[in-house]
Amino acid sequence: MRGKAGPDILTLFAQEHDSRVLGYANANLLRSDQATEPLQFVEFWRNVTGTNPAWLDFDSKLVPYAQLSQLNQRGIWFVTIRRRGTALLRRLDKIPASQWAKAVIDIPKRRHQAIRYYEQRVHLDDYEGELRQRAVTGFGREQPTLFLTNNDEETARELIIRYAQRNRIEDGIGIGVNFFHLDCLASEVRLNVDVDVALTVLANGCYRWLAQRLRGFNKAAPKQLFRRFVETAGLVEIEEDRIVVRFDKRSHTPNIREAALDAERLSVPWLGNKPLVFSFA
């Protein structure tokens, strides 16, 4: 599609911080719905878990300041990026260098680790109360990056590390495009695309589940898991009282045996509830 304009659909993705699982997606969106979609996600999370999410990390263009105020009233901590205006940058240029603090962001494989930051409290239009603002330099950009948060407990370094991990969501979307072909729209109808996106989220979750059970592969990408474990030759035999999956001999077969994925004796409902058993060559 290089050099050509193609159809696109506005989609919101949400990823759980610790497990890195894409747990929510909605492609049935209009631009007029964008401002309220984070609150819709909060309601979804509350219906699933019974509580509000403790933290939300999101892009600066997603939530207007009025919606930030509603998140604060619900007791939800958030960190986001503020858009840089010309007047705001001029004020930051006048701050003496002695008032900027230093910190080290020791994330493995991170190129820019030594940073400088300046913290202050600000008032924003349509937001009730004050927010903590941190202007950070040292990210490899010409202009400072402005962080906004309603949390007064975590240090500036901890908040910067927290927001830096938001890039995992972009990595997850990249996996969805490269491996699950998320960019191949099945229809120009938003609802149909929403179903495809939901199935992609489910497939991503299945691969994350498999990765957590294979020793040494808890951070493996779906493409790697597919090549080494899923795309495996074998034989499926439906016997009188069980279903036997016989794996051919491969170098990674011991990992599957060690994971004991059939230890719970899962039954297959559409085959008479026969239990599933693995057998290795």
Image (tube, rainbow, N blue to C red):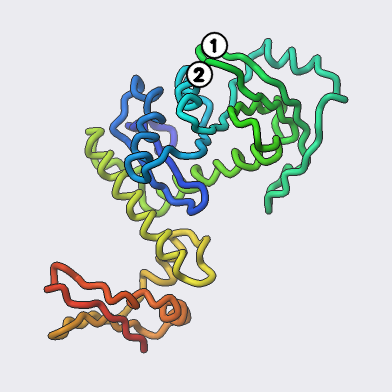
Residue at figure coordinates x 31%, y 29% from the top left = 29
Mark 1 sits on what residue? 125
What residue is drawn where x is 66% and y is 24%? 133
Q: Secondary structure at mark 1?
A: loop
What kind of residue is marked 2? Tyr
The vertical placement of 159 against 281, above or below, is: above
Is 99 in front, or is 81? 99
Q: Kindly check if marks 2 and 1 are in contact, taking CB atoms under 8 A apart as contact.
A: yes
Residue at image mark 2: 65
Q: Quadrant of residue 119?
A: top right
In the displayed structure image, the side of residue 83 where residue 197 appears, left or right: left
> Looking at the image, is 174 positioned above or below residue 216?
above
Q: Earlier in the sequence, mark 2 or mark 1?
A: 2
Q: Nearer the viewer, residue 175 or 6?
A: 175
Q: Nearer the viewer, residue 128 or 256?
A: 128
Residue 218 percent coordinates (x, y): 51, 64
Q: Is residue 183 above or below residue 227?
A: above
